[in-house]
Each structure stands twice: as structure tokens, then as C-alpha cells.
Amino acid sequence: MSAAEAKGGVVGTRKLRREDPELLVGQAKFGDDLAIPGALYMVLVRSPFAHAKIQSIESEAALGVPGVVGVYTAADLAGEWAGPMPCAWPVTPDMKNPPHYPLAAEFARYAGDGVAAVVATSKMAAVDAAALVSVEYEELTPVLDLEEAASDATVIYQDFGTNTSFVWTLEPDPDGVRQAFDQAAVVVTEHYVHPRLIPAAMEPRTIAAVPSPMGDEYTVYSSTQIPHILRVMLALTAGISETKLRVVAPSVGGAFGSKLDVYAEELLCLALARKLRQPVRFTEERGESTMATVHGRGQVQQIELAADQNGKVLAVRANILADMGAYLQLVTPGVPLLGAFLYHGLYDIPHYSFTCTGVFTNKTPTDAYRGAGRPEATFAIERGMDTLADKLGIDPAEIRRRNFIAADKFPYSSAAGLSFDSGNYGPNLEKALELAGYSSLREKQAQRIAAGDNHLLGVGISCYVEMCGLAPSRVLGALSYGAGGWEAATVRVLPTAKVQVVTGTAPHGQGHETSWSMIVADRLGVPPEDIEVLHSDTAISPLGMDSYGSRSLSVGGSALFLAADKVVEKARKIAAHQLEVAEEDLDFVGGSFKVKGSPEREMPLAGIAFEAFTAHNLPDGLEPNLEASVTWDPPNFTFPFGTHIAVVDVDQETGDVDLLRYIAVDDCGNQINPMIVEGQIHGGIAQGVAQALFEEAVYDTSGTLVTASLADYLVPSAAELPSFELANTVTPSPTNPLGVKGIGEAGAIGSAPAVINAIVDALSHLGVTDCPMPATPERVWKLLQQAKAH
Amino acid sequence: MFPSKFEYRRVASVDEAVSILSQEEDAKILAGGHSLIPLMKLRLASPELLVDITKIENMSYIREDDGEIAIGALTRHHALETSELLAREVPVLPAVAATVGDPAVRHCGTLGGTASHGDGASDLPAALLALDATFVAKGPKGERRIAAKDFFTGFLETALAPFEVLTEIRVPKGYRSYSFQKFNRRAQDWAIVGVVAVRNGTTNIGYVNMGVTPLRATAVEQQLASGASDDDAAAAAAAGLTPPSDINGSSEYRAHLAGVLVRRALSELG
């Protein structure tokens, strides 16, 4: 879509979200709001120990609580499963994947692992009874530290004899990499740790499995971001025909990747509803959610850069340990691979090597979390570039300029084997520097140092490129992923000219209903208010690949765009027939077909829709009704990019870091609704800043999660963040008809390295060269103490 | 997040509350509920009976009385925050109250509740300690007054007997010069360390989260009284104390912070 086309329509405008009124007044129905008569409530008894042998489970006292229907252990439910819980991404043929069933049978593998399910007629009764289930455990040595786990000092799964699940390597030219390092004038070797993060979606998970009163059919309501994939997986795992299973995602209160999964509780509700022939529901508590919902990140990285004297990087070699947690969830092993191709960032680096070792620990399983692999990759290269710049005495902005992939090299074939669709990095960086007032910030920084000010100023730059729009199905196949990356859409013009749009995307806060209606409105020339967007119910939208990986617009939106065009082409045939002209003699303008040269002869889409419905006068062979479906498989990923600049104040006496300013210039290609784009960037930055400054899943030495509440797990609020200064550049993607790239994860990808670079920048004159995440006041204070002691 | 089963009674007078508390074994007073209810939901507290005192009339006030400021135990933090009388006479209290939790918390939480809870990590108890407040409690044998220095006795423990109701908190006028230094990571969090300094001729300093109870910075106060400079006095900030260690700060770091914050507080005092 050209900018000119966009101007005439609603696309490109800051249209308010149609989703918001009912959310703001509390009328939206989330899973726990659903009235389900006769539903039973499930509560899980969870292991308090990170690693333990389950000796016995005594449920008699629990069964005595009034209202309790049953207490179920792994043994009680063993016959319910057609197979273990799914991991859809076996990244290597020899990947070790322990059998994972909804309840732990012999061993509890992490604190929070479910060992029994209590079902009662009220939630209160189920909670009371769960407290009375007595489980005898034999505590085993927990494996908690990632590097220790990799050493196999204690092995979690005896059958494997190792804690390593897989080693995945991408090394297209080992000789080239070796030579580059041998000949390099400068080599930088850095180690970074990405703490585990707790996704902390505003709505914890909610599930209800409801048997049909008609017989052996089930509707599963789940606060999931993957209703379609979930249906397939539930069918396969619970041994229910997919045709007997409907999955509905009601209003979903955020996910950030954590609801891109198939969870034990979903399977348990379904199996127990089948067993008890009554609806069974589950709502996760907040504290429970911190342990029972997947975590994100959890990596230890080594990155090496080989460069010449001018700071031109010749090779990058990354070697990472990725924390799988206790089990492999749906895409756990694939998460680091989503970053595996991006450790060279947006720099033209000819030689590339990447190795990832996936390691089991006795902690909550990890899985996708906003950015999934790409924030980790971006952090490593962006911290590494700053370190290299520091070593060579080159300004951090300048070293990036010297290494950017040149604008005339797109589509760019990377050493890691990707084809970057489009990019223009230089002007994007310059725009951010100008907005920040970069040189004046450097002056102020120097003045504060010269004046001996306790408050130091730091400026951190992070340039990012990411791959999203997941994804070309063939590429996913080549990466051993268990599904495709297409998306489906249907556009249906009803007899009254109202439009139904059916999408396979599954929004959980992104505003798809608003954006999708805008796209179709412009294609069909109808007001967006006349367009209803249907989604997240497999009975209404049977085909879909759901929402994650910043894919919905570039894949699902494109499918929709093409479906709308198909409708227009069908309408054109009817208009040509009835106006008795050739199809090519019609212009489609403002929702009406007009005869070229005599625009007073026209037929509006509304009229055509009714003609298509009555089918009294259609061209020979044309099917009635005005409806078209498209399933679109993108030819490539999209590669959004941008520059983020953080300005921090560091209080040397306390170690407190105050984020003073945050400048973000993002390029996500064409924008459908800039207000929604900004909202995504705001949230993403907040999460990345949170990783840099606030959030960390902390375990004690016994493997108990210490940060199991929002009082201890510090999700920042608006009060901790400045007003973000946003701008953009627009480099359309040539890989989809909308020219869009994706913006859901970009903010979270660019921000953590910007903040840490800023802190290190503030302290570098004191000899500080790195800063761990999150940069808590005490950690920063200790860095300063250590630096001053030298 | 369901508490264990409990009984609930709403009372109309302090006497009624005292009478019930005297008869029942395991009863707790419910006021703002912002400490008690979360503890109950986490099942860290499971009282059998809650005695709701929030409907007792005339227990929420801020007034001059006998040369002091008298504050009813049911006075909400928000009322402290917005009181013109306090702003004039004891300005440290509005300043401290304004940083407790968030607006929702401040509209529910009561001064009597936070004082009776006696949490060393809470801000207002430290302020009351710094102000040498007097706590008025009513029990079966009538009313008694407890000096702040005798009030906070241990971890979540006060001098109040289980059958006593805190009815009023009295603070002296005259401490017009104050500084409140609250160091935390998020606006709504408890202080990692808080310093409440007030001056009316002499300087009193209260600590938040430097021990299991609210504390006075006794060593600093003594140094100041004997004419030490602010910097020298601040250097004694952690003398004799063993601050707690948790994920937000080690004991060592808290001791260091106390010194920094005391110095900043002293330099802010008029």
C-alpha cells in the first residue's frame, strides 16, 4: 500500500481502539468472568521443593472437606493421556526431552510442579482441601545454577546421564571465523547473564473445559494466545478427536509469550471434565502464576568480536547456555534459536559462529517471552559493540556507523544465512542522536565529571534489528519446528453490506479488531464501523496460526488484505456483468465500481453484495455470495529495526539509577495505526527497562522462588519511567503487500542494552566495564566500591 | 488467595470491641485491613474472629487538644496527607503519609492500624517514634497512655495487650523542621531504608526498615546533641544496629544507605 493510498483512507490514522470502551468500564469477559453453571473448581497441590522424590500422597482428609468431588494424582489420571505434553520444536534430532505429563508421578522437578489436582464444587472448598492433601517427599539435591547444571555435577534425569538437552550450532564457515580471529587487531570477549523473567501478564491463566450437553464434545475456554494450536495439541494429548473440540480464547489480559503454550492445567481441566461429565475450571493465583506459568530469558552468554584497528568487525562468535528449566514446554528449545541468527545485529559482519547449549535445571520451565531470543542476541552484540568502542577509543555512535549494513546492500544476505528484507540504518541512528541532543549530552556528562558531581550522567545507545513475522513455513520446517507459519483470513460482505472479517490471529491486547477493520475498510471502501472482526474461537475461525513473534499484522493482516482484494475482484465480475462492460473498464473508487469515462454509471459494493446474495443475476458460473478466503504463507521474515537511546543519572553514593530520558526511533515499515504502534513500543520499552533495572526471578539456595509476589518481583509502574520520546523512520518491507514489519517485540528488544550501556557509560571513567542485570542500587553501589578500590 | 474461615463482627463502640476482645481467644481488630487481609489471604495469619472497628463514630479526626495534636486511630493516611492542621503543625506526617503505598492504600490504611501492626518497614510508625508520639489505648480497666519509645516492642509486636484498642495517637506541636528520605526502587514499595528527621531545638531521627521494629537513630542523635558536625553524626548512622538483609538490600548496604540518607536529611533540616 502506498503512502498516497493510505492518505485517502483510515489506514495510517490514529484511530481510537474499538476494544477499549468495554475494557475500561470492566465489561469485557475474561476467563474467570464467564458464568458456567454447574462448573467444578480445580486447584493444584504443588511441590514446595525444587527436586524431590514423591513418596506418598494422602488425600483422605482433603476428601472429607464438604464440597470436594475428588483428589487426583498422576496415577489416577494415567489412562487419560494419549501422550506426554507436547514440545513442538525438537531443535536437534538427538534432543533430550523428558516425558512430561500434567501431574508429576515419581519426581517433582521444580518448586511449583503439580502433584495432585483437587476438584470441588467451590473454589474455597478446593483451596481448603488442597491444603489438607499430605504429600511425603524425599528431598533431592536441586540443580539451580545454569553453569553448574551444564557441568553435570548433579544430573536431574538419570536416564539421560546429562543435564544437556541439546547443542545447536550454526557455523557456516568455521575456517573463516578462525582466520578472522587469528588476524584481528582487536578481540573482545564478553560474558553476559540474562536473569529469568516472570512474564506477569495482568490476567493470570484461566481455563474452563465444558462438556457439551449433546454428548462427547468439549469447549475449552482458555486465556491463551494460541487457540488454534492449542486445539490440535489438546486433541493429540488428551486423545480427543479434533472435530469434537472447540477452543475459545475470551478476552485475554496480556500474555507476552507466556500463553503461547500448552499447559498442564488445560489438559487436566479437559480430562477431568471428560471423566466427571461436568465443566471443570481453573484460575491461577498470582503467586502460583510466578511458578506455574513459564519464565522468560535465562541465558549465560559469551560473545567474541574480532575487529580491525578501525573498529570494523570481521567476525562474531557467540556461545550461549540457555536455561530450559525442568521440562521442555511447547517451544522452549526453539526460543534461543529465534536469536541465533542475530548475534551480528545490524552490522555487516562477514564471519559468523553460534552455538547454543540447552540445559535442564530444577526451575520453572522457560519459554517464549516478548522478543524470545532476540533481546538476548541484541543485548550481546550491542553491549559488545560498546565494549569494542571503548577499547578502541571510538564513540559508540561512530562504531555503529562504521559497521552498519549499507542501505544499498538490501536484500542483504547475512553470514548467518538470512536475507534481510529492507533496511536503512544510518538515517535512523542519526535521527535518534539528533532527538537526544547527543553532543550536548556528552558535554553535560563531561561537566558533571569535571565538577566532581555525585550524580553522573550516562548515555546508552542500542541499535537493533530483529526477525519477526513468523514465518515462512519452509524455513520453520528447516529449523525443525513442528508447524507452519501461514495465516488465514476470510472477508465476507453480508447482504446488508455489513462486513464480517474472520482472522486466524488471536489478539490478547494488541487491538487487532481495530487495525484489521481499518485495513479492510480501505480495501472495500466501507466505514470501519461496518466491519466486525471475528477471532479466537475455533468454531468461527477454524484455521489459524495465532499471535506471537510479531507476526499478526505482517502475516495475518496480509492474508486479510489479499482476501479483501479477492472480494473486490469477485464484486468486479458482478458489476461488469450488470453494467454490461468489461471488467477492466471499471474503476473501484470509494467503495463503488465506476465505468471509466462515464463515472455516473456505477455500482456500489453494497448493491453488489445484495445481488450476490439473491443471485438472481450473476455471471454464468459465478458462485453466489461475496466472500473470499486466503491462506497466506510469507516468503520471508520481516526485519524491523531502530535506535534506542537511554539517558541515566547514577547516584554514586547510593547506586541508584534514574532513567532520565528514553528516546526510541523505530522502523516497523508502514504503520496501520500509529497510536497502536506507539502503545506497543511503550509497553515493550517498559519491559526491557524492567529487565535492565528491576525484574529478576530470584531463587534461594533450596530452589524456592523468592520473588513469588508482585511485592517482591518488581514490575515497574509509570512512576518509575520517563515519558518516552518516540519517532520513526519508514522503510517498507517488500515481503508482504502491506509493507509492514511488526512492532510487538521491538521495544523489548532494543531497550535493555540501551539502559545497561548508559549505566556503564556513566561509570566507565571510573573503570567500570560492565553491569549485571537488573542493575539494582546495591549492585551498582558495589560496582562503584570495587572500581574505587582499584 | 482465600483466607481460612473466620467469623466477623462489626462493633459500634470501643467498649464493645474491648469486651469482645476480652472474651475471644483468637480475635483481631480489622481497621483499614491493608496489612491484615493480605496476611490472611496468604494464610500467614488465620484469626478466628475479625472485630471490625471501622464503623465506630468519632475515631477519625485530627485536632488540637491540650497543646498537642490528637489523631483518631481510624484516621486514614489520605486524611493525614491532606490535613492543613498537620501541614502547619506537624508537616512531617503529611509528607510521610503521602509516600505510603498508592492512593488506594492511602484511602484505606489507618494511622492506628499501621501503628498497631508495628512493622519496622512501615513509614508512619518510624515518624511517630521520631515525634515522641503518645499512644492512647483502651482496655477493660480503662484508658492508658504509652510513650512511643515503649510502644514498639518486637517483630510485629507492640505494647498493646490483645484486648486493648488503640484509640488515639498524640503528637507534640513544634517539630516544624523535618526531612523524610525514603529510598526504594518503585514508588509504591516499602522503603529499603527510610529516615525521618524532625527538629525542634533537638533533632530526632526515626528509621524505617533498619531493624525489626521502627528505630531511633540514637547514636546520631547523641552525636548531634554533643555538637558533632552533620557528617560526623551521620557516620554513626548504623552504630549498634543490625539492619535486615533481603532481596532489596543486604544488611551492609542498608547500613551504608542509612549514613547517606541521614546526612541528606540533616542537610535538609532548617
Image (spheres, coloured by chain):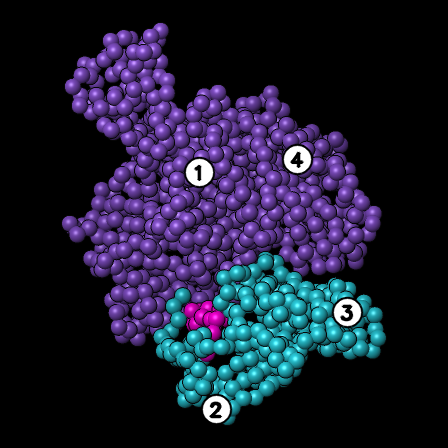
Q: Earlier in the sequence, mark 4 or mark 1?
A: 1
Label 4 chain ID = A
Question: Could you confirm whether marks 4 and 2 are on the same chain?
Answer: no
Range covered by the magenta-colored residues? B29-43
User: Mark 2 against mark 3, which lies toward the viewer?
Assistant: 2
- In the displayed structure, would residue A126 be above or below residue A646? below
Q: Please report the residue visible at 46 percent of the width from the left and 42 percent of the height from the top.
A: A334
Q: Please report the residue visible at 80 percent of the width from the left and 68 percent of the height from the top.
A: B230
Amino acid carrying label 2: it is Pro
| Mark 2 closeness class: few <14, some 14–19, many ≥20 residues within 10 Å | some
Residue denoted by label 4: A435
- Mark 3 near mark 4, Cβ–Cβ under 8 Å? no
Q: Secondary structure at mark 2?
A: loop
Residue A600 visible (yes or no): yes
Mark 2–mark 3 Cα distance, whole angstroms, equals 44 Å
Amino acid carrying label 4: it is Leu
Q: Secondary structure at mark 1?
A: loop
Mark 4–mark 1 Cα distance, whole angstroms, equals 27 Å
Residue denoted by label 3: B234
Chain B shown in which color? cyan
Q: Nearer the viewer, residue A401 or A645?
A: A645
Label 1 chain ID = A
Q: Is residue B39 magenta?
A: yes
Label 3 chain ID = B
Mark 4–mark 2 Cα distance, whole angstroms, equals 69 Å
Q: Which chain is purple?
A: A
